[in-house]
Structure formats: C-alpha cells, structure tokens
Amino acid sequence: MREGFRDEPAATGLTPAWLDIAFRERGVSRYGPGESNPRIAEYNNTTQLAGYDDKISWCSSFLNWCMKQSGIPGTGSALARSWLSWGNPLDAPRYGCVAVLTADDAVEWKGHVGFFIRLDGDNVYLFGGNQLGEVRELAYPLERVLAYRWP
C-alpha cells in the first residue's frame, strides 16, 4: 500500500458497490447533434437537471445516479462542488471515494467530480461521467483536487 492511499483494491479485494455500478456504465457517451442519449438523461433525473439532455455537464448527475443505485443518498445537485459537503472528509484518497476537483478554468463555483481510482506523482485518475463526453477513466492534475469524500 502506498503512503497516503488507503484500501487499495489489490490489498483488500473490495470494490465499493457504487463503483461496481459505475464500471457497468463504462462507455455510455453523449450522442451527436440533434440526438440525446436517454441513459444520460436518466442520470440527470437524479438532480435538478431532470428533463435535460446529454448536452449539459453531467458528471455530478452520474455520481448521484450511481449512489442512488447502491442505496446511498447523493447530493441531489448537478453542481460538482456540492460533493464538498457530502459524506465524510478523508485525509487521504480511498479506492472508490468521491474526488472533487476544481474546473479547468478559474470560475469558483465550477468543478468536476468522479470516483477515485489511483494516483501517481502528477495525476489523480478518476472514473466518472462526462469525462471527454463519456463514462470512463481519465487523469487530472493532482493540484486540481479539492477534497476526497466517503459516505
């Protein structure tokens, strides 16, 4: 186990229920112009984005949907930073925890959210929705991490 990283799956053999659910959604993606993926609309129905299509930012909707499927209340909000006050804070990342990031611009209320998978010297790897328009794993610079949260 690496320092500052708890419950690595290889060490525990456990994957949180919400992350198993998320993995089964791998590859769900935004449709092209004039079309909308009904599965992403379903994710949006767990937040105030109910009724919206797949053209809006849906990273938080995806996490809310995964949590709901596993029987855990999410934030009910489409704002990524709403997860900053959800659950319990972690001092170090834990496999499957919620990672809250800043946005890639300087707007204070914007952000991104996904499930923590791993890290290396420069990046945190998240599995989540609306990552290059789909449900997938993607690397983000470590300096963008605002918090790690656990139910």
Image (spheres, rainbow, N blue to C red):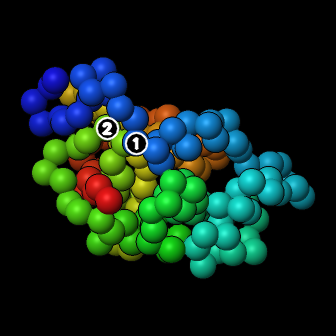
The residue singled out by tag 1 in the image is: 16
Tell me, yes or no, if residue 59 can be seen here.
Answer: no
Query: Seen from this angle, which residue lies furthest top?
Result: 10
141 on left or right of 130: left
Query: Seen from this angle, which residue lies furthest right?
Result: 34
Residue, x 26% and y 41% (percent of image)? 94
The residue singled out by tag 2 in the image is: 95
Tell me, yes or no, if residue 100 can be seen here.
Answer: yes
Mark 1 secondary-structure assignment: loop
Q: Are marks 2 and 1 in contact (CB under 8 Å)?
A: yes
Q: Along the line of sight, which residue is nearer the eye, 33 or 22?
A: 22
74 on left or right of 84: right
* Mark 2 to mark 1 CA distance (whole Å): 8 Å
Quadrant (top left, top right, bottom left, bottom right) of the N terminus:
top left
Quadrant (top left, top right, bottom left, bottom right) of the C terminus:
bottom left
Q: Position of residue 47 (x, y in %)?
A: 58, 73
Vertical side of 151 occupied by 91: above or below: above
The answer to which image quadrant residue 23 occupies is top right
